[in-house]
Amino acid sequence: MSEHSFNLTETQRAFRDMMRAFSDEKIAPNAEAADREAAYPWASFNACKEADLCGLGIPEAYGGQGADMVTQAIMTEEISRHCASTAVTMLISKLGMLPVMNFGSEELKQQYLPRIASGEIQASYCLSEADAGSDVASMRCRATRDGDSYVLNGSKYWITNAGISDTYTVFASTDPEKGSRGISCFLVEKDWGIQFPKHEDKLGLRGSPTGEVVFDNVRVPLSHRIGEEGQGFTIAMHTLDRSRPTIGAQAVGIAQGAINYAGEYMKGRKAFGGPISELQGLRFMLADMAIRTEASRALVYRACSLVDHDPDGELTMFGAMAKAFASDTAMSVTVDAVQLLGGYGYTKDFPVERYLRDAKITQIYEGTNQVQRVVISKRLLG
């Protein structure tokens, strides 16, 4: 296995401190309302936009900051300590633009990346369908060549930022007989006729809209095909390898937020003649929560550093490990945080129940943790 390791640089440490203060001041006040009202967190998004965070992962040549992946993970983690929905708003446009950055034409890069970096527009990633989530090769969305354009028909499901985003990176079959080798990738603008008939009423991540995206004879110029025809499956997997570690970072942030809140609560809650923080059984619970979260953070940062330094090495396996382990950790830590608050933890008056609900999706999206274990075992067994 690769022995590549990393240490946070002074710049990364300073950025972490800045992001921590920013999240406390600008993100935390909006988090509860976004969840309660299932409303897009515009105030938090605009604060991120003003802080130039929208372009953190976009190359400098296209108006972004060109930050390394560990720095991007730090941003995601610190925002997620208070609001996982806002963290998704910062992740989804990068996810939508990764195919453009790595496989798109220079024309597409010049046309869209600077506007994403400035926060002028947002992007979504359209891969999953109602009957084709982890089984991407069974997708039914079709793209038919018609002269100098393609005509898209079909629908995508579970799409983050559906209706909010201005552009949609869409995977569709251009040759159904070839299965996964017949999938192609397209960049489609919202105003070209995309429909959004349904949004989900979700358990968690309620401030991030998730919905159906429908294409009914939507015409896409040939210039907006990303990569070559039939290259779509490769593009999709290449993209997910590079985005899964940031889902791990989101999970770490959720877990850390739960630890922070539970620890403060324990110091103030009195029982049996003193604060419950003096009870050894509860102290050990909190310690175990911190141990698992710190291990998750280290694995996430390692996977992120592989994106920057060794993407052709073991990124696929370590990205899957980071996503699976960190999200499983977030779920167990938030369950324990609710337990530490007792009956109060089970109410919406305290944020730990929101952390628990938000944690669950990290085990599901961008490939379920069962799929991650398939990926890991394949790598281990050759």
Image: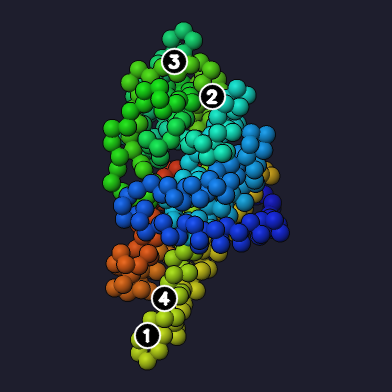
Q: Quadrant of residue 63?
A: top right
Label 1 vs 4, first from the N-terminus: 4
Q: CA distance from mark 4 to mark 2?
A: 50 Å
> Callout 4: few (<14), some (14-19), or many (20+) C-alpha neighbours within 10 Å?
some
As measured in the structure, the alpha-carbon distance from the residue carrying label 3 to the one carrying label 1 is 66 Å
**Residue 228 visible in the current orientation:** yes
Q: Amino acid at mark 3?
A: Tyr
Going 38% across and 81% down the picture, which residue do you hit?
A: 269
The amino acid type of the residue labelled 1 equals Lys
Q: Quadrant of residue 161?
A: top left
- In the rendered structure, the answer to whether residue 7 lies left or right of residue 234 reads right
Circle 3 packing at 10 Å, graded few (<14), some (14-19), many (20+), is many
Distance from label 3 to label 4 (Cα)?
57 Å
Instruction: Say if mark 2 contacts mark 1, CB within 8 Å.
Output: no
Q: Which residue is mark 1?
A: 270
Circle number at residue 80? none
What residue is drawn where x is 53% and y is 52%?
A: 76
In the picture, the quarter occupied by the C terminus is top right
**Amino acid beneath label 4:** Tyr
Q: Nearer the viewer, mark 2 or mark 1?
A: 1
Instruction: Decide which of 380, 220 is in the foreground and name it.
Output: 220
Q: What residue is rendered at 66% in x and 56% in y? A: 12
3D distance between C-alphas at marks 1 and 4 = 10 Å
Report which residue position mark 4 lands on.
265
Residue 365 x, y percent position in the rendering:
41, 45
